[in-house]
Image (cartoon, helix red, strand yellow):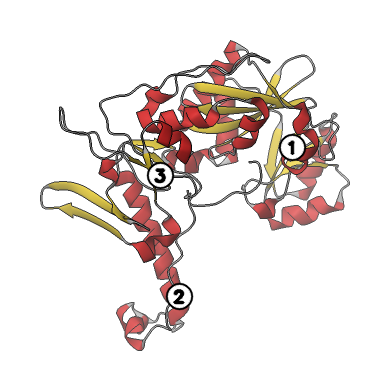
Amino acid sequence: MALHLADLGVRPVRVDLAKLPEHGFAVRTGGGRPARVLLGTSDGMVDPATCVAAWWRRPRAVAPPQREPSPPSTARAFGAAAGVPQDDDARTRRLSDAEWTAALAGMVRVVRGTWVNDPGCEELARRKLAQLEAAREVGLPVPRTLVTNDPALARRFVAACRRGAIAKSLSSTADGGYTRAVRSRDEWLRDRLRVGPAILQERVEGIDVRVTVVGDAIFAMSVDARHGSSPDDVRSCWDEIVASARPERLPEDLVRRVLALHRRLGLRFGAVDLRRRRGGEYAFLEVNPSGQWMHAEDATGHPIGATLARLLACGAAGASSRTSPAPGASPRRVPPRHTGRATASVTNATGTARPPQNAPSPPRTSPAPGSAPVQARVGLR
């Protein structure tokens, strides 16, 4: 991504949220003036107002530096006299977590400009129940689904799925594991539901289709996992099936619905997983607001990275190609469109501001890959 941005004359600035305690953080407000945010980087403080875009890309949680055990004065300062337990280190850590969470949640609302993606929208879009309902509302076919922690209800649902069923986690953590087939008599299902609710869904037989959306540009790839070792989750058998990957041309009506889903969720970037049935119908599985895309670019030649760089460099005008090329055709490259705004994006946390009319453009800066939004994900999500 840094190379694509460099081609556009944009200098990436990386802001690593995990290192803000070390690098520094400040917001000045009041006195009749708008808020000014300063975020620390390895090269010094950066003002997001000098940036035109923020790439909110899988940020790491803030990790305050290791400290010596809190002195007694800390306990007095934070209310131990009011009956708070005397475990100073644990309480200080809880306070640190709460204060950084509040500071960063407020900061992303104060920093205005183009976000890819807006952190609030991305947090909502990560909720699978919300995205399934949003997909249904825009007309995308959603397989029959049950989210429950009730083993009896789960067994009845799975038994009623004549073509089989799958189970997957509601959260997108490594501990949730891969999507897997499930039968009503499987003993592991009861144990899994004791941990918490899970998604149970009727199994859709067919070809997997990964649709990467960048602004209004659509890049679709099909891959056949049916003969791989894990036909229900391409992430676990990608090396086995990558040779089957092909560019996919989506029907115009499906393109409109996928873009409508992104608008409803407030996303500028996302990776939508579909499955194409034998008869050509598509079923919606999920959307990952910060999904991986380099494997799809490598397999198809789609210019996903270059298009994303233009989106960051030029705002929403940077991605104007509506659909992916037909199978076998060369990917269509959209020339960059330059606006009167300064170009910059900061990976993980920063924003953009519109320069005053006719004012000189601020320095071109933009976040490099590697920083990331508040929970990391793993694998080819």
In this view, 227 is above or below 111: above
Helix or strand or loop: what does disc 2 sit on? Answer: loop
The numbered mark, 1 or 3, whose residue comes first in the sequence reads 1
In the figure, residue 300 lies in which quadrant?
top right
Residue 273, image x and y in percent? 65, 31
In this view, 188 is above or below 223: below
The type of residue carrying mark 2 is Gln
Q: Residue at x 46, y 34 (%)?
A: 4
Helix or strand or loop: what does disc 1 sit on? Answer: helix
In the figure, residue 235 lies in which quadrant?
top right
Count up the numbered dots: 3
Q: Residue at x 80, y 26 (%)?
A: 205
Q: Nearer the viewer, residue 363 or 238?
A: 363
Q: Would residue 341 be found to the left or right of residue 122 on screen?
A: left
For disc 2, the marked residue is 66
Q: Nearer the viewer, residue 206 or 249?
A: 249
Most extreme residue toward the top is 252
In this view, 333 is above or below 290: above
Residue 111, numbered label = none
The numbered mark, 2 or 1, whose residue comes first in the sequence reads 2
Residue 34, image x and y in percent? 18, 45
In this view, 59 is above or below 79: above
For disc 3, the marked residue is 367
For label 2, the crowd category at 10 Å Cα-Cα, with few meaning under 14, some 14 to 19 and many 20 or more, is few
Disc 2/disc 1 C-alpha distance (Å): 40 Å
Q: Would residue 131 be found to the left or right of residue 295 on screen?
A: left
Residue 321, image x and y in percent? 49, 17
For disc 1, the marked residue is 234
Q: Residue at x 46, y 40 (%)?
A: 2
Most extreme residue toward the bottom is 72
Q: Would residue 48 be found to the left or right of residue 330 on screen?
A: left
For label 1, the crowd category at 10 Å Cα-Cα, with few meaning under 14, some 14 to 19 and many 20 or more, is many
